[in-house]
Image (cartoon, rainbow, N blue to C red):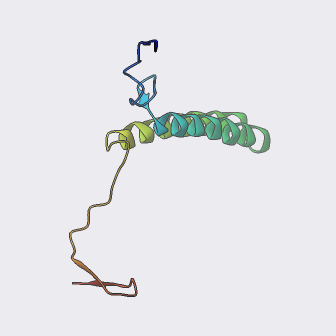
Amino acid sequence: MARKFAVYKGLQKPLIFKGFKGKFIYWGLAFLLSGLVFGALTMSLVNMWLGAFVLIGCIVGGLLFTAAKQKGGLHTKSRDSQIFILNHYGRKNTI
């Protein structure tokens, strides 16, 4: 006789962390780490205050950009308003 186990119904939903979903978690993490690296390099090579502004600017700007891109959806698709005719060789002709 087969056992029945409870199935978790939320497996098909994207991962959510601090308001970011799916791939945008990695985008936010990348902007955070790149801001830290660029800020540290600017602090060590140019000036401490300029490095602090670069650090804050990269992190805040990147997270705002990520939040704006997230509003477009997880799977953003390009919308073409043109009509394409494909021939046998795969070349596109635009009308």
- Picture residue at 59% right of the left edge, 34% below the top: 32
Residue 74 at what x, y percent from top left? 38, 42
Q: Is residue 8 left or right of residue 32?
A: left
Q: Residue drawn at (38%, 22%), measured in percent from left and top?
A: 10
Q: Is residue 50 visible?
A: no
Position of 80 compared to 51: left or right? left
- The residue sitting at the front extreme is 1
Residue 44 at x, y = what percent?
A: 79, 39
**Location of the C terminus (image quadrant):** bottom left
Between 26 and 31, the residue placed more toward the observer is 26
Compared with residue 73, is residue 78 higher up or lower down, i.e. above or below? below
Q: Between 35 and 50, which is closer to the camera in this rendering?
A: 35
Image coordinates for residue 83, horizontal then vertical, percent: 21, 76
Looking at the image, how many numbered discs can be counted on the residues?
0
Q: Quadrant of residue 85?
A: bottom left
Q: Name which residue lies at 45% across and 35% down.
A: 22
Report x, y in % for residue 84: 26, 78
The residue located at (42%, 13%) in the rendering is 4
14 above or below 89?
above
Task: Answer left or right for 55 relative to 17.
Answer: right
Q: Indicate the quadrant where residue 51 lies.
A: top right
Res 34 visible: yes
In the image, 44 versus 34, the foreground residue is: 34
